[in-house]
Image (cartoon, rainbow, N blue to C red):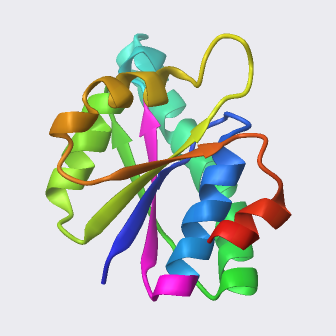
Amino acid sequence: MRKFLVILDDSRECLNAMRFAAMRAAHTGGGVEVLSIIAPEEFNHWIGVGEIMREEARERIVVHFEVFAKWMRDRQGVDPELVIREGEAVQEILSQIKDDPEIGVLVLGAATDKKGPGPLVTALTRSAGSLPIPFTIVPGDMSKERLEAIT
């Protein structure tokens, strides 16, 4: 089964990327894999404190994921899977794509502010020609109705 890989983070544009991935998966008989990445610099503390912070980050990710997963199951009939990795975001995305051969499309949300589309979109666009799969960039301010129309 072809999977749509979507990144779960705290950005506003993440919501539209999740919607798009779920709708495309539902319409094409695919699946959704949600990847959340914990940056290593979050844990540069004493070992015990770092482990507690790492576990708290994982718990927050699972709670955040469950909100999207419930919507995907209830509204789109898609049961997403969650993958949590630790490291630098772009490298972990590329590693996940390499590790899971069922991933067929990477879906990213683009920010709408004046700073640009966001660090992931910027970094991955630079290396788009060498990515092993296509990726879709979903505008962060696209309406639900428009997303439904194009998926």
Residue occupying the point 17% across, 67% down: 101
Instruction: Give the percent coordinates (x, y) of residue 70.
Output: 71, 74
Residue 77 or residue 55, whichever sits in front: 77
Residue occupying the point 21% across, 63% down: 100
Q: Quick check: 17 above or below 147?
A: above
Looking at the image, residue 139 sits to the left or right of residue 5; the answer is right
Q: Is residue 79 visible?
A: no
Marker count (numbered): 0
Question: Can you tell which quarter of the image residue 74 is in?
Answer: bottom right
Residue 118 or residue 71, whichever sits in front: 118
Question: Can you tell which quarter of the image residue 91 is in?
Answer: top left
Quarter of the image with the N terminus in it = bottom left
Instruction: Give the percent coordinates (x, y) of residue 117.
Output: 59, 25
Give the magenta range: 27-38
Quarter of the image with the C terminus in it = bottom right
Question: Can you tell which quarter of the image residue 24 is in?
Answer: bottom right
Residue 31 falls inside the magenta stretch: yes
Looking at the image, residue 94 sits to the left or right of residue 120; the answer is left
Q: Quick check: 96 above or below 104?
A: above
Instruction: Give the percent coordinates (x, y) of residue 136.
Output: 46, 50
Q: Is residue 124 visible?
A: yes
Secondary structure, magenta segment, majority class = strand
Residue occupying the point 28% across, 38% down: 92
Looking at the image, residue 118 sits to the left or right of residue 106; the answer is right
Q: Quick check: 72 above or below 147?
A: below
Residue occupying the point 66% across, 42% down: 139
Residue 140 falls inside the magenta stretch: no
Instruction: Give the percent coordinates (x, y) of residue 51.
Output: 42, 30
